[in-house]
Image: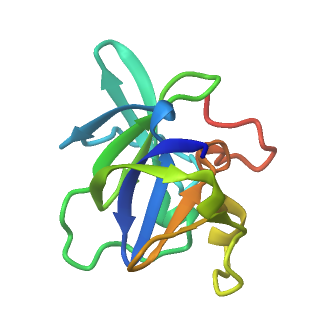
Amino acid sequence: MDTEQYCTFYLDDLYLAVEARRVHEVLRGQEPTEVPLANSALRGLINLRGHIVPVVDLRVRLGLPPPKDGSPQINVLVRTPHGPVSLLVDRVGDVQELANENFSSVPETLQGPARQLIRGAFKLADRLLLSLDADQAVDVTANGSGVG
């Protein structure tokens, strides 16, 4: 049975994951510097040990409202062909090893912008885990050239 490890995280009621091999690191408390006239999904830039890293607001990308409680979000840095990009999430879950045979297509109930950013879903015992297409999620430009 083929399996792969996934790093899980939460946004509102959504339980999401990206392949663990794509995750560079997880950072708390990194306030991005705004970029004037940037796409609303590009929250800004952070300095990571001398490297400038774009910060993508996954709530905006998925069409979700801002967090109600105003709590700080967490940066999940994912590897892209252009270098690391931070995805802002509400909270981080754990790493799960999932069988590829439990992967299914995007649920019909998932509508709006999220439908284009989700690769599919894993059926877990108590809920669905949505597999995020990290490359699509970090692409916040109109022409598809990415943030990097």
| Residue 60 position in % (x across, y down) | 51, 64
- Residue at the outermost bottom position: 109
Q: Quadrant of residue 67?
A: bottom left
- Residue at the outermost front position: 1
Residue located at (46% from left, 61% from top): 16
Query: In the image, is 139 to the left or to the right of 13?
Result: right
| Residue 34 position in % (x across, y down) | 40, 43
Q: So how many labels did they put on this image?
A: 0
Using the image, determine if residue 79 lies above or below residue 117.
above
User: Considering depth in this image, is 60 or 117 the residue closer to the camera?
Assistant: 117
Residue located at (29% from left, 37% from top): 26
User: Considering depth in this image, is 63 or 79 the residue closer to the camera?
Assistant: 79
- Residue at the outermost top position: 50
Using the image, determine if residue 52 lies above or below residue 124.
above
Query: In the image, is 116 to the left or to the right of 87?
Result: right
| Residue 75 position in % (x across, y down) | 33, 44
Query: In the image, is 146 to the left or to the right of 57?
Result: right
On-image quarter of the C terminus: top right
| Residue 147 position in % (x across, y down) | 61, 35
- Residue at the outermost right position: 143
User: Considering depth in this image, is 120 or 141 the residue closer to the camera?
Assistant: 120
Residue located at (62% from left, 69% from top): 114
Colour scheme in use: rainbow
